[in-house]
Image: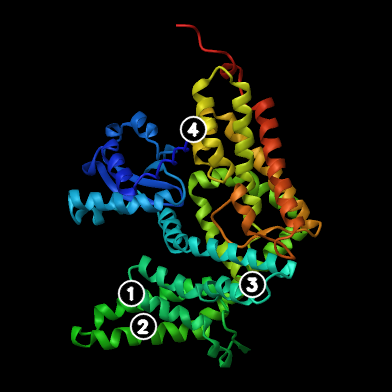
Amino acid sequence: MTAAAPAPAPDPRTTAGALLPLVGGAANITSVAHCMTRLRLGLNDRALVQDEALKAHPAVLGVVEDDTTYQIVLGPGTVARVTPEFEALLLQARGAAIKAAQKDRNATPGKILLRRLANIFVPLIPALIGCGIIAGINGLLLNLHWLPALTPALAAVASGFMALIAVFVGLNTAKEFGGTPILGGAVAAIIVYAGVAKVEAFGQQLSPGQGGVLGALAAAVLAVHVEKWCRRHVPESLDVLVTPTVTVLVAGLVTVYGLMFVAGEVSTAIGVAADWLLAHAGAVAGLVLGGLFLPLVMLGLHQALIPIHTTLIEQQGHTVLLPMLAMAGAGQVGAAAAVYVRLRHRTDLRRTIRSAMPAGLLGVGEPLIYGVSLPLGRPFVTACVGGAFGGGFVGLFHMLGAPVGSTAIGPSGWALFPLLHGDRGLSVTTVAVYAGGLLTGYVAGFAATYLFGIGRALLSPPPAP
C-alpha cells in the first residue's frame, strides 16, 4: 500500500482570506504590520473578532493583545508570506486609504523608534541566517580539511553580504524615514569603499567599514534630512539634478569626516564592553539576560538589541549575546513541561502544550507563552527563572574560556545549532556548551515551575457539573 502524501502547506492567500473575516473584516482593520512570527493588527472594534474560530484555524499558533494591537502568531516564514496577501486583500476592499490608516495612532516616540529599527534590520535577517549557516558549514569543512577547492567559494558566498551590509542598512533606513532608498544606500556605501583608507579624520586614517551598520544608519538618516530640505527649497526644474547631488555630497562629506569616526568609536566600545562584561562577569550577565528576555519580548523592547547584535556580527563574525538570550525559550519549554505533568486534569492546557511544544523547542515561544505560562501567571515567572539559569550556564563557560556565539540573529532553541560559533568556529565544545545551557534551562524551568509555579487553585480539579 502506498503511503499517503503529506498535506500541502496552506496557500498564503487562502490563509489571509480566512483570517480577514475572523478579525471583523476590512472595515475593522486600522493598521497592519508583522514581526518575525506575528501578524499585528490595529482594530476599530475588538468585539468583532471571533477569538475561538481564529485560534482554531490550522495556521494560527496563538493570539495575544497589547495596548494597541491584536497579534496573530503564525510562525516564522508563514507570517512573511501571509502579511502581503492580507494587505492586498485590504487594499482590494478599501483602496489606498489603508496606507494612511497603517500608522499606529497611539504609538509613543519610543515605540515608533523601536518599530523603525525593526523595519530596518528585520528584513536583513533571512540573509544573515543563510550566510551564517553557509559560514558554519565552511568552517566545519576547513576544520576537517575537506573539499579544499570549494571552501574559498563558500567563504565568498558567506561573506559577500556582510561586506556590504552597510549598504542594505542605508537603503532600508532611507526607505523607513521617507527618503529615496538608493540615495541612502549611496551614502552608506561610502563606509565600505576601499578608497576611504586615503582619508584622514580626527588625526587618524579611516579604514573601510569603520562605523559599520551604526555609521550607515546615521549616514542614511542624515541623507534623508538633506534630501527633504532640498525638495522644499530647490525649484522643480532643477530638482532632478540638484537634490541627489547635494544629498550625496553633503551627507557623504559629513559621513567621511565625522560619522565614520564617531560611529566607529561607538561600535568598538560595544564590542569591548560585551567582551569585558562576559569575560569578567559572564555568569551574572547570562543570568540577567536569560532571565529578562521573555519580558523584553512581551514589551517589544528586544528590538533595541538588533543593532547591537548586528554590530557584533559585523565586528567579530558572531554575537555572543544571542545564545544567552535564547535560554529564555529553554526556560519556557521546561515550565510548560511541568504544567503538563502536574495539571493532568486540564486537558485543554495539555492539548495546547502538545501542539505548541515542537515550535517551542525550535525557538518559537509565543504559543507556549500566550497559550500556557502567561495566562497562568506564576509559570511565566518560573520560566524566566529557567532562562536565567540557562543564560548563567552559557555565561559561566564564556568566563572559563569557552565562548558561544551565533553568526546570525532570529533563530533560537534547537534551530540555533547550525549558526553556533566559538573561538574555533563550530566545534564540539561550542555545541556542548550551548546544549548544556538548553538542558539547564529545561531542568531549571521545569523544577521551578513544578515546585513553585502552580498554585493550589490550579491543582484542584474543577467541580463536577
Q: Residue at x 57, y 73 (%)?
A: 159
Give the Cα separation between the discs numbered 3 and 2.
28 Å
Image height of 20 relative to 337, above or below: below
Of residues 367 and 417, the one nearer the viewer is: 417
Give the Cα separation between the discs numbered 3 and 4.
41 Å
Q: Nearer the viewer, mark 1 or mark 2?
A: 1
Residue 205 position, x and y percent, is: 61, 89
The residue at which mark 3 appears reads as 268
Q: Nearer the viewer, mark 3 or mark 1?
A: 1
Q: Check the picture and name the quadrant holding the C terminus.
A: top left
The residue at which mark 2 appears reads as 247
Q: Residue lying furthest bottom in this view?
A: 198
Q: Residue at x 55, y 73 (%)?
A: 157
Q: Residue at x 61, y 37 (%)?
A: 333
Of residues 367 and 250, the one nearer the viewer is: 367
Total number of numbered discs in the rendering? 4
How packed mark 4 is, by other alpha carbons closer than 10 Å (few <14, some 14-19, many 20 or more), is many
The residue at which mark 4 appears reads as 371
Mark 1 and mark 2 lie on one chain; the one further toward the N terminus is 1
Query: Secondary structure beneath disc 3?
Result: helix
Mark 3 and mark 1 lie on one chain; the one further toward the N terminus is 1
